[in-house]
Image (spheres, rainbow, N blue to C red):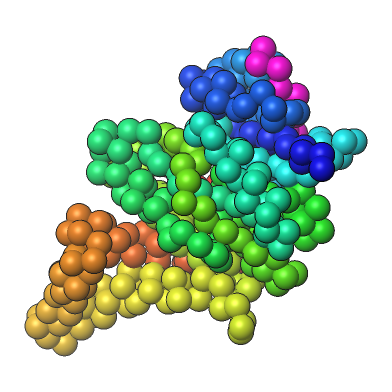
Amino acid sequence: MQAPRIAAVLIGRNEGARLVAALAAIPHEVRPVVYVDSGSTDGSVAAAQAAGARVVRLDMSRPFTAARARNEGFAALASDRPDYVQFIDGDCALAPGWIETARDFLVEHPNAAVACGRRRERFPEASVYNRLCDEEWNTPVGEARACGGDALMRADAFAAVGGFNPGLIAGEEPELCVRLRAAGWKIHRLDAEMTLHDAAMTRFGQWWKRMRRSGHAYAEGAALHGSPPERHFVTETRRALLWGAAIPLAALIGTALTPWALLILLLWPLQILRLAPRLGLSRAAFLTIGKMPEALGVAEYWLRRIAGRRAGLIEYK
């Protein structure tokens, strides 16, 4: 039996040394490597070419999304489509042995469209925000509902459902997985190291923007696939609106009647204490506080949709 052919699609913009590390970590048997550049000015294109990658330069006169970049990278493989494609973000580097592990799993499980593993933060000790990312990446092992931006995908399954939705500014991976599962495919999270990621978050404002982006993704995902039986991101959207908008607004409006209305805000520390035994105090606190920027992201999505305006990127780097 002939070994499956594996290619890689790497996307990035001004990733510098992170891109060089990402390219160097791709095994030699993974070919071709397509690098999709979105307007870099730091020599990324030259670095990718020097590493032997095919380079696709996005037309930046059109709205940019990571989903669009990945789709154009996949399209560059059309003349000789591989069996599997490893998608990688430019701020990540593949772990040794991942490709072999994920390839063998997909070979042994023909109903699986996606294999993903453990993404880790490269510098979790650099900030509380990096540490939160590292904990976020630690998803349960086994059959999953979604993957992230790094994953090995079956090329035919990806093509059959139309790839990523290029209009989404965030949450494109879970949305793709909704359509894959609807078509009968499975998503699996393997108990294996997959990538090292460099969030490079050192400021509260970066974390706030990232949570806003999550809220936007929840709202748009629920608008697309929120009806039964999927109910995609419906629960996440409702939690954001309850904890990030309804509770503070109720306290603020209630003070017009009585100052005791501020006691409503005690629900936040109570929620933190409820979550702390399972998540740890720090993560519980940030997840609860993070509902405020998530609620802002939900509101931004709906305000733009009502106004008929396209959403712009919400970048935290």
Foreground of the two, 91 or 86: 86
Kindly give the residue lying farthest to the right in the view shown. Answer: 79
The structure residue drawn at horizontal position 56% and vertical position 78%, both measured from the top left corner, is: 231
The structure residue drawn at horizontal position 82% and vertical position 39%, both measured from the top left corner, is: 2
The structure residue drawn at horizontal position 50% and vertical position 76%, both measured from the top left corner, is: 234
Foreground of the two, 256 or 249: 249
Q: Is residue 25 visible?
A: yes
Q: Is residue 302 visible?
A: no
Residue 9, position as x, y percentages in the image = 68, 36
Kindly give the residue lying farthest to the bottom in the view shown. Answer: 257
Quarter of the picture containing the C terminus is top left
Residue 276, position as x, y percentages in the image = 19, 65
Quarter of the picture containing the N terminus is top right
Circle count: 0
- State which quadrant residue 222 falls in: bottom right
Q: 276 left or right of 180? A: left
Q: Which residues are magenta?
A: 50-60
The structure residue drawn at horizontal position 64% and vertical position 46%, both measured from the top left corner, is: 104
Q: 83 left or right of 314? A: right
Magenta highlight on residue 54: yes
Q: Is residue 13 above or below residue 297?
A: above
